[in-house]
Amino acid sequence: MPKTMTFSGRSFVGHWQKITVLLLLMVAVCWFFADTEIIALEPWTELGRMMQGFIHPDFFATEYLLDALWQTISFALLGITIGLLLGFPLALWYQHPLIAAMCAFIRAIHEIFWALIFLQIFGLSAITGILAIALPYAATFARVFADILQQAPMHTLFSLPKGTDKLSAFIYGRWMHMYPQIVDYIRYRFECALRSSAVLGFIGMPTLGFYLESAFRQGHYQQGGALLILFVLLIGSIRFWAKPFMLWLYLPLAVYFLPPIPVIDSQLIWRFISVDVLPPMLQGQAFLSWFTPDNLSKVFDWSYNLISQQVIPGMIATLVLAFCALGLTHILTMILLPLNTRLMMPKAVILLMRAVNLILRSLPEYLLAFVFMMLLGPSMLPAIIALALHNSGLMVFLMARQADKVSVPLTYQPRVDQYSYLVIPTIYPHFMGLLFYRFEVIIRETAILGMLGVMTLGFYVDSNFSEIRFSGALLLLVFTAGLNVVVDYLARRLLRYPQNRIQAC
């Protein structure tokens, strides 16, 4: 019997059990330090008003509703298209460390932060919104396409005629094998892009988020409820209206009906990249004078103050909030998953729960946090609940497919003990892999939730942009991206460890 299968010494607890216990311990410690106070005086009264708004939605209260819906789709569609045009060539050279590092840095910064940067250059225009989606998505496409293409079987390459050129070998030997997976992933990213496009409305873009924020902030819940219902329907019906052949119609229309793009001031762009992004003590000075001992000392003091007063407190708050959200996501997913698999529930219950999942995964975390913050007040609790609900909805959606494919004996009965003994151990390694992938996403989202008042890194980034201290904002963004890269690296190391060992789970 292999050593890891015995019940003595270190092998009694398997790798995944150790990781789960470690994760829950981290969550318990972080929850102790998290600010989870409910500050609102009458949250149930406000919740009742919101529910009334959802029960009696007013679909005609929003002016320019169709325009907002179309702009939400247009920004997502054009952002995805540019992202694909940039990301696919990068995927071919992704094995180069420099390309991989550059992509990791770019995708580690959230779309809203990119929008805040482009806002300083292009103003409140369609270019800002489209580039804010396209740039991080291109970096994500590069990594995912590279991973997918690596899984392509090699036997077709060896069967091609001698002298086949490299492009043909690539298309017929690798691309066509993985084409269905690539199309599925693009469809999934388009759904993500729709959410990102809606959220960009919170910084002034003419998408659904702009009208949602106005409706909820003014207490017009019937209007807000109608907008949320429309957004969920938009996401839920993607498979019907976003057919690949329809892109030839949608793309020209998306370009034609874009909002008017203002004239771009080249001097403004040059001032931003040559002056505004520099630390204050270097602005307006000659390049060679930057390296004098006096200036270097001032830059050091400026950086030290920024790191000690904003970066470190922001990072700690970001990690505390992210770990709490991750732990709650784990618990919610484990509770909801049996309700969504045919191995435990009848078809009617599964259909009902999948409708619930559709709502949870369709609503962006930022939007959910905004709504919960109006109910519970400005603390970490609304952000934790919002992140956990959205991510558990997404994880249940993906894991239910895995659970349905598990082979069980003919004597299997849909009971908790048999489900826990036969199904959970089979899917748990993949479950943890997906959970840690979502951890990287949660940290990205946690950072931007600072713009709602939670003092994560996003709070300080937004404050620096608001006070026109671009150099401070960019330094914070560098640390924000660095935190994501480190977390991604550690998660991959943690999950890669047991590959050569027999799983005890």
Image (cartoon, rainbow, N blue to C red):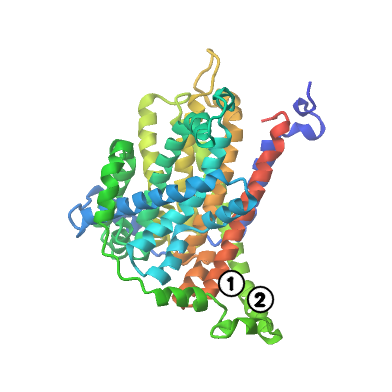
Q: Residue furthest left?
A: 60
Nearer-N-terminus badge (1/2): 2
Instruction: Name the mark nearer the viewer: 1 or 2.
Output: 2
Q: Quadrant of the C terminus?
A: top right
Q: Where residue 109 sits: x, y (%)? A: 52, 59
In this orientation, which residue lies closer to the viewer: 122 or 58?
Answer: 122
SS at circle 2? helix
**Residue type at numbered disc 1:** Gln
In this orientation, which residue lies closer to the viewer: 165 or 476?
Answer: 165
Quarter of the image holding residue 256?
bottom left
Tag 1 residue = 310
- The answer to whether residue 265 is left or right of residue 171 is left
Q: Quadrant of the N terminus?
A: top right
SS at circle 1? helix
Rounded to the nearest angstrom, the CA distance separating label 1 from label 2 is 10 Å
| Mark number displayed over residue 304 | 2
Say above or below: 352 vs 88.
Answer: above
Q: Residue furthest top?
A: 410
What residue is shown at x 37% (from left), y 60% (from top)?
Answer: 129
- The answer to whether residue 217 is left or right of residue 14 is left
**Residue type at numbered disc 2:** Tyr
Q: Where residue 59 sits: x, y (%)? A: 20, 52
What residue is shown at x 71% (from left), y 85% (from top)?
Answer: 293
